[in-house]
Image (tube, rainbow, N blue to C red):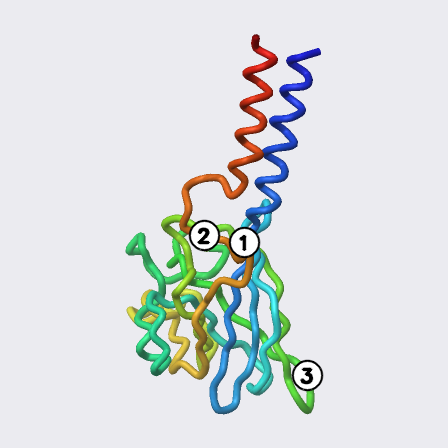
Amino acid sequence: MCAKLFTSLVVICLAVEIRSENRVAIAHLISQNVTGSLTFTETANGIRVSGTITGLDVGKYGFHVHELGDTSTCDAAGAHFDPDDNTHGGRDHSVRHVGDLGNVQFVGNENPVANIDFVDNIISLRGRNSIIGRTLVLHEQEDDLGLGGNEASLNTGNAGPRVACGVIGIRSPSGPWNSSVSILPSLSLLVFAVAFVIGK
């Protein structure tokens, strides 16, 4: 009975902590013609990227996370985020930059819009592959996903100039993201105190 009670308390504690620690980031793409907001939400399967972008003609356009958070100009954001020194690829390729998110597709007649909703299991909101503080960039041309047969393809996907960009920042939770301790220390202490009493 005591063991079951302790196990239940531990499961509840972990469930509450995991649920309360789900992180969401946001980026606002802004340029002379382009506007859009995208969220990056932690899920069990990876980071869900969702949102809409307007301001470009019908077609596909390269869409990447770049290494720096400097948006004084979109070019100041540096190269694709690539901590592993890989070649460029598509979102579903086994070899790619961490920041390679493929293309977004604008559809529609009078006012084309790109509706984005996918899950990526390479980018992260914590650890080595964290995209927090880096820049989301929309390019002028379609990304060839590293299949263009030339050096530029393996570096940038031949996606062309940068037409809009925005820093990826914290949306929620509002508590510190850089803490290595539980955000619910009192609950953890309670569980261990109960375990100690039960053990006696």
Q: Which mark is residue 177?
A: 2
Q: Nearer the viewer, mark 1 or mark 3?
A: 1
Q: Residues within 10 Å of mark 1 (few under 14, many from 20)?
A: many
**In this picture, residue 114 sits left or right of residue 77:** right
Q: Residue 20 at x, y = what percent?
A: 59, 46
Is disc 3 placed on a helix, strand or loop? Answer: loop
Is disc 1 placed on a helix, strand or loop? Answer: loop
Q: Which residue is mark 1?
A: 23
The one of 49 and 15 positioned closer to us in this rendering: 15
Q: Is residue 119 visible?
A: yes
- Decide which of tag 1 and tag 2 comes sooner along the chain: 1
- Decide which of tag 2 and tag 3 comes sooner along the chain: 3
| Residue drawn 56% across the image and 69% down it | 38
The one of 98 and 29 positioned closer to us in this rendering: 29
Give me the C-alpha separation between circle 1 and circle 3.
32 Å
Q: Which mark is residue 108?
A: 3
| Residue drawn 44% across the image and 40% down it | 181
The residue positioned farthest toward the top in the image shown: 200
| Residue drawn 65% across the image and 80% down it | 107
Give me the C-alpha separation between circle 1 and circle 2.
9 Å
Q: Residue 87 at x, y = what percent?
A: 33, 59
Task: Give yes or no for contact between labels 1 and 2 (Cβ–Cβ under 8 Å).
Answer: yes
Circle 3: residue type = Gly
Give me the C-alpha separation between circle 2 and circle 3.
39 Å
Circle 1: residue type = Arg
Determine which quarter of the picture holds residue 4: top right
Circle 2: residue type = Trp
Q: Residue 200 at x, y = what percent?
A: 57, 8
